[in-house]
Image (cartoon, rainbow, N blue to C red):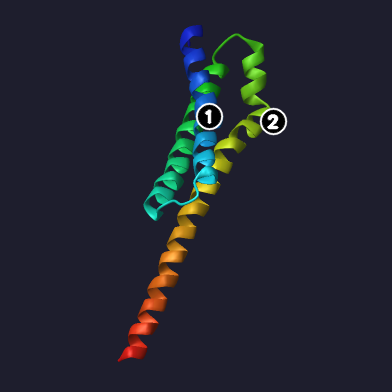
């Protein structure tokens, strides 16, 4: 891979690892009120961003294995590469947790509505 393309992919990894998840977290923390639809979209966005990040990291690791540079081989084929994959795992885990929370909340309300409807009969 030429140096220019490597750096573009590297910058994308930084965006999808830090910047985009950071903005999503900030939106969720700063907002005083937020709709369920927005929460769902933000949770799904975290999952998608994590997937893209993992694919980009894998792409960089594959390209690094085929370059003569030693520093990128050490970065992507060592234990440090596991640390790089923790960021998308954390983002995906938080996104799944958010979506799960919405599903559980919806099901609890649906059960409560069902129970109230049964008592009314």
Residues packed near mark 2 inside 10 Å, few (<14), some (14 to 19) or many (20 plus)? few
In the displayed orientation, state which residue is furthest to the left: 121
Q: Position of residue 19 (x, y in %)?
A: 53, 29
- Frontmost residue, 16 versus 28: 28
Gap between marks 2 and 1 measured at Cα: 24 Å
Left or right, 51 with reference to 120:
right
Secondary structure type for disc 2:
loop
Q: Position of residue 98 (x, y in %)?
A: 49, 53
Left or right, 96 with reference to 37:
right
Q: Residue at x 45, y 59 (%)?
A: 102
- Frontmost residue, 118 versus 4: 118
Residue beneath label 2, please?
A: 79
Is residue 10 at all visible to an observer of this figure? yes
Secondary structure type for disc 1:
helix
Between disc 2 and disc 1, the foreground one is 1
Left or right, 86 with reference to 35:
right
In the displayed orientation, state which residue is furthest to the bottom: 121
For residue 64, above or below residue 56? above
Is residue 92 at all visible to an observer of this figure? no
Residue beneath label 1, please?
A: 19
- Frontmost residue, 109 versus 57: 109
- Frontmost residue, 97 versus 71: 97
First of labels 2, 1 by sequence position: 1
Q: Residue at x 36, y 80 (%)?
A: 114
Residues packed near mark 1 inside 10 Å, few (<14), some (14 to 19) or many (20 plus)? few
Q: Residue at x 40, y 48 (%)?
A: 38
Please identify the quarter of the rendering in which residue 112 is found: bottom left
């Amino acid at each position: 891979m030429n140096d220019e393309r490597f750096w573009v992919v590297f910058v994308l990894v930084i965006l999808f690892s830090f910047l985009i998840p950071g903005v999503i977290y900030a939106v969720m923390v700063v907002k005083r009120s937020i709709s369920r639809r927005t929460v769902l979209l933000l949770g799904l966005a975290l999952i998608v961003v994590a997937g893209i990040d993992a694919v980009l990291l894998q792409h960089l690791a594959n390209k690094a294995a085929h370059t003569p540079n030693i520093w990128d081989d050490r970065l992507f084929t060592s234990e440090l590469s596991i640390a790089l994959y923790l960021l998308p795992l954390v983002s995906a885990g938080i996104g799944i947790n958010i979506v799960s929370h919405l599903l559980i909340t919806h099901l609890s309300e649906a059960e409560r509505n069902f129970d109230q409807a049964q008592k009314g009969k």
